[in-house]
Image (tube, rainbow, N blue to C red):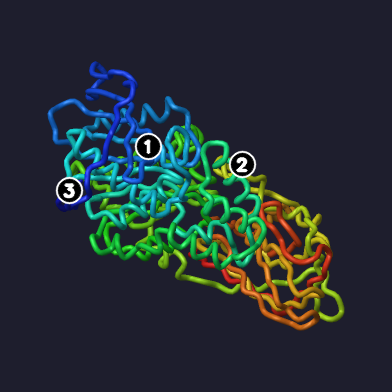
Amino acid sequence: MALLASVLAGQATGVSAVESADGQAAGDASQDGGVRSVRGTTVVMRDGTRLAATVYTPAGAGPHPLIVAPGAWWTMPQDVLLDEKRELAEAGYVVVAYDPRGLRSSGGEIDMAGPSDVADVSEMITWALAHTPADARRVGLYSSSYGAAVALNAAAHDPRVAAVAALCPWTDLFDAFVRNGTDAGTIATYQAVLGSLDGRLSPRTRQAFARLTSNRDIEGVRAWARQRSARTFAAGLNARRTPVFMAGEWSDPLVPAGQTGRFLDQLTGPRQLWMNPGGHGDSSSREAALLQPEASIREHARDWLDRFLLGRPNGADRLASLMVRPRNDKRVETYPSWSALERSRSQVPLRAQQVSGDDGMRLLTGLDSPADSGAFPVAGLIDSVGPAPTTALPLLLAPLAIVWRSEPLGVPWRLRGSPTVRTNLTSTASEGTFVAYLYDVDPLGVGRLISHAPYSFEGAVPGARFAADVPMAAAAWNVPRGHRLALVFDGGDHRYSGVGPVVSTLTFSAADTRLSVPVHPG
């Protein structure tokens, strides 16, 4: 690759040093490649919280570029973590990997990537600069999942951070748990249980999860989530043009596809997002690399850090801002932005099935049908190796499900981005929930799930018509010639907590239901 622009350097700030207490060494690696030592330590934060850390020091006098790596929500196999951090040290980095407050061996309580976590990252940087041969001008953050969200928020606040690699971060925490007015109850409960097993939830975090699963004080949860979302702090990243690399998955149950893309478009500095098949973190895990050898996400994250922290002209920053691997195509596509991906939208003519005489299609709420989002939490991992959640259209019958179909496509479609639905309906109750699914249907009537989204309403006048706009999670899916698109509504899905009475009736207008999809020429 040609020689690239010079490295962006962070400027040191006057954050005071913190105390440290070295623990038992994790093992001397002086004979192992370019690693001088690996040792365990405890770093004490200003508020007295003790965070468990492991420090990997490369061979040579330094100063060396520094990577601070806050840990994920759930533990990974220790041999994988050790191997990865050791590889970074062999490449010339000082690495300080630590358990965030409230998780595993660290003290304190989980702050959910909030202000305490942001302060912890800055104090870890300050500690590393005082206690390791780290270079204050070359500081990077690197993590996945929960730690990636912490890293993005911290980078927006600390001007010393010169580059970030964030794998499967949320960038809008409220959007992760509340979708179109519907609580992702199963997802929130799953996260809360894992957090309780692997750590200690703070009272505010526990309260927020409780409100999410009981649909209480949602506006209060929104304010809590805003202070834990990178989209709130994009201006801080833009002010210093901090280089940001992110990775995401199309079937991530925690981070709806499209969330990270919209955040990408908020950034004005060097930026990249690579979207791949899979669920939360699947495309960037070592295990998933065996299933998706073409998706070298961690290798590219390393290249990104090497480019901006080691100054290597490896071309990482010359790739497109958005790289996309569709769910049913191994080829990588590139786009200059997320908005460019979604630029070409088409209205899809639909024909309703099972219409009653008054142009209505009736659905019972609170009941499920064979239309489904896929088995949580493994649907994304299954999808990454090929089989999308599947149903047979002839099984989708009113009043458990209602269906609209397009005509067979005369040419292939490359659906890229967020499908949207607009419909008119009446309800026998003042509140209720339905779930929309979009399927690719083959000539035999077998439907493969492209996208889905719940929708909840409240304050409706029973019997009075009202409009509903339903944006769905983004997708990258190739629809073959001769296949149809099918739009399906049903009354529930195991991922979401519906509102309203069970078996109230929703009546949709067959003629006033519209589907819009972003399509690129096949």
Instruction: Return the residue at label 1.
Output: 50
Q: Position of residue 58 (x, y in %)?
A: 22, 28
Q: Position of residue 463 (x, y in %)?
A: 80, 81
View extreme (top): residue: 31
Residue 53 versus residue 301 in the image, above or below: above
- Asked if labels 3 and 2 touch by Cβ distance under 8 angstroms, the answer is no
- Which of pointers 1 and 3 lies earlier in the amino acid sequence? 3
Q: Secondary structure at mark 1?
A: strand
Q: Quadrant of residue 34?
A: top left
Q: Nearer the viewer, residue 490 or 152?
A: 152
427 with respect to 240 (left or right): right
Residue 2 circle label: 3
* Residue 457 in the figure: left or right of residue 517: right
Q: Which residue has dot 2 on it?
A: 378
Q: Amino acid at mark 1?
A: Arg
Q: Nearer the viewer, mark 1 or mark 2?
A: 1
**Label 3 crowd (10 A; few <14 / some 14-19 / many >=20):** few
In the picture, measured across the screen, residue 199 lies left or right of residue 390, that is left
Q: Residue at x 78, y 55 (%)?
A: 369
Quadrant, the N terminus: top left
Q: Residue at x 25, y 60 (%)?
A: 241
- Position of residue 145 measured from the top left corner of the image (x, y, whole percent): 45, 45
Report the Cα–Cα distance between label 2 and label 3: 42 Å
What secondary structure is found at the residue carrying circle 2? loop
Say few, some or many: other residues with alpha carbon within 10 Å of mark 1 (under 14 / 14 to 19 / 20 or more): many
